[in-house]
Image (cartoon, rainbow, N blue to C red):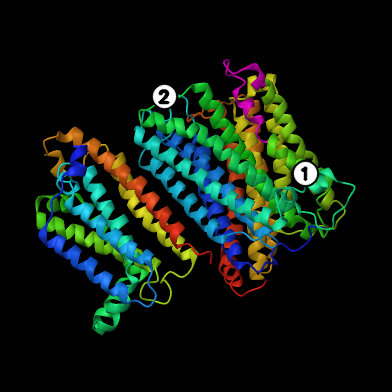
Amino acid sequence: MTTDAPSLNATNGAVLRVAIAYLVVGLGTVAVMGLLGVLMRLDHAGMLLVSPDWFYRIMTLHGSGMITGLLFASFGGLAAVISAEVHLSSRALWIGLVLYLTAMMLVVLAIVFGRFAAGWTVLDPLPYQGKTWTESAGVVAYAGYLVTGLAIVVVCGAMLRGTTAARGGLRRALAWEVLFHPKRPSPDVTHPPVLIATVTAIVGLVMVVVGLVYLVPLFLEAAGLVRHVDALFSKNAVLLFGHTMANLCVYVAAGMVYGTLPRYAHRPWKTTWPVAAAWNAIILLIFFPWSHHLYQDFAQPLGLQILGNLGSFAGGFPSFIVTIVGALALVYGAGLEWSPTSILMLLGIWGWAFGGAGALLDAIVPINQVMHNTMWVAAHFHTYNMVGVAAFAWAYLYHITAELSHARERRLDRWAAWLYGIGAVGMVALLFFEGAHSVPRRYATHDAEWQGYARAAIPFVAMMVIALGWLGGEMLARVGPAWRRTRIGPL
Amino acid sequence: MPSDLVTRWEWHPVLAMGVSVSALGYAAIWWRQEVRSRGELIAWVGGLVAIVIGTSSAIDPLSDERLSIHMVQHELFTFVAAPLLVAGMRPLTLWLLPRLAAPLARWGHALSRPRTAWLIAGGALWAWHWPPAYDYALAHPTVHDVEHTTMLIAYALYWSPLTSFGHAVAALRTDAVRVVYLATGATQSAVLGALLAFSRTPFYEFYVAGPAGADFALRDQQLSGMIMLLSGSVVFVVAAVVTMRGE
């Protein structure tokens, strides 16, 4: 069975509406957080003076807002893709959105009014004892992170329940018949987006449990029941949760690519043995690379350092070999239909590959010793998030609003998509150059000799702002008609 | 003092009579309904119990000493009593509507329209927490009672568009508008809670001039802000769980 079935032929308009809400809220958050990123870049360029107090508050908001915005936008897109064949509870998804909004509100208030600026660093005396904020601000920010975890549980629970019910059990939802009986072809194999929804839902649920492992001791510390939480334990747990969450974004977003790109390539994307094997492997492999962030922690056990190195490479294989090569094979010689959706999706594939390569280099111990505390790390995660995940999500929002509203594509839309690509690639390239020249990361003030990179990045940032301004306006204009279309009945 | 919270009760005759009449009257009307919902009865009684706890337990006298206790009292009225009374209101509304004068019924409808109700609740919340108004209410018991009554009514109006009492369907018909309504409502109280929790100066002169002093007043204000911020968030999430329909 193939995956070239149209993703929006659902009769379940309720899920499409909540999916649009996730995409609009998530990408709206990403856009606002992007503007905060511009402020930080202008500060690095020496063109705008941001006080260290505000810089770290902006950095905290930018980082946490971006990751959650991208994750929930991607959840929405994936829900829309699989809604054609999986009955999802739109009620659960709406409750998940309320939880996400509540979490965002708590974090924003802790930062704006409470002056919380610890980022996601939990090494004692952080996050509670900062120079500029009170313990209460730390508690509210971390309550926000806890509510984010609850939102993920609700969404992933709804996804897992939907996919296992639709496929008649977890084994079939994970396409194990393809994995374990490849020579007995079945006429009814789980489509890749449903497989991806199942895999990412399992990962999301396990990841939240890991998050609780460090959040609960932190709350006990705030309540005075625990004096100090062990620093090494905290750092491992926060990175196991946070690194997994950042990686989860791209895997959830990949579901939109599997469900949408075949329509532009006019070819099916089948659940072959490599596809089933790769996505099943991700359930385990996604939990191994976190330790490459702790190479410089002398107290970290050697076994975990080796796991970090090997796990980073092992985790990269499924995505590189199956999804990226698979996507390129899908479009090669297919007479790809060029549109903002296909342009942004291919850009996203590049961003995923290039950002992932940057991460793999950083995961090699000798390179990590030199590069890890430089802008190289910021470069790699901006590449796979901004050029990868964000491009996938923008592409899907463009696709779903165009399809539902029957809006015609304008020539300028395609130019805007290319412009976004040029701007984004230029911006991250300069971050990589900064890293390669040992410019440190997480510094509020940059020395004069470092400022040239950020200044050179400004035109590229301007290109992204112009492109997203145009595309965002187009998509927003289509949201109303698309929303009404979902109420008419079978699409 | 913690034991006071359980053992110290003061019964106000007027309030006791009002609550008793309200409970008995509601029970009589509820009993005559063709379709009786136990949930509505429990909600109405729960709302009355919340009012009794807020006004007759040690919370009431202690709220003059501590802003944090006063905040718990406000939360009981706005986030517990008001939504529970609204959830149990349907039989009462069905009984009352034919008996009410038309202009009065029109006023009721007009005030419970979502935008109006949202503005009234937000207005009451911010106006009564404005330091001069808050201090004045604390110094004048009658004004203090008016403060609590208006907060209760304002939030009863706020919660009413989320239910279908008296109407065929709720005024807020889709999940999307319910999310917007709840999120903006939650933000109002959360912003006020954050201002109280993260302020470096105490807002209310009444507590600063109290026997515990300014330092205690500031710490207590920060605690009250945390109560408002965190418990309010929980209430709005619970409201979402209850009112989302999957539409």
| B114 lies left or right of A189 | left
| B5 lies left or right of A310 | left
Residue positioned 48% across, 31% down in the render: A444
Magenta span contains residue B151:
no
Q: Can you see residue B121?
A: no
Local crowd at mark 1 within 10 Å, few (<14), some, or many (≥20)? some
- Image quadrant containing the N terminus of chain A: bottom right
Find numbered disc 2 in the image and state the secondary structure of the residue it sits on.
Answer: loop
How many tags in the picture?
A: 2
Name which quarter of the figure residue A54 lies in: top left
On the image, numbered disc 2 is attached to which residue?
A: A125
Magenta residues?
A286-305
Residue positioned 39% across, 68% down in the render: B163
Seen in the picture, residue A299 relative to A345 is either above or below; the reply is above
Q: Chain of mark 1?
A: A
Find numbered disc 1 in the image and state the secondary structure of the residue it sits on.
Answer: helix
On the image, numbered disc 1 is attached to which residue?
A: A324
Residue positioned 38% across, 64% down in the render: B39
Q: Residue A266: x and y, percent?
A: 82, 60
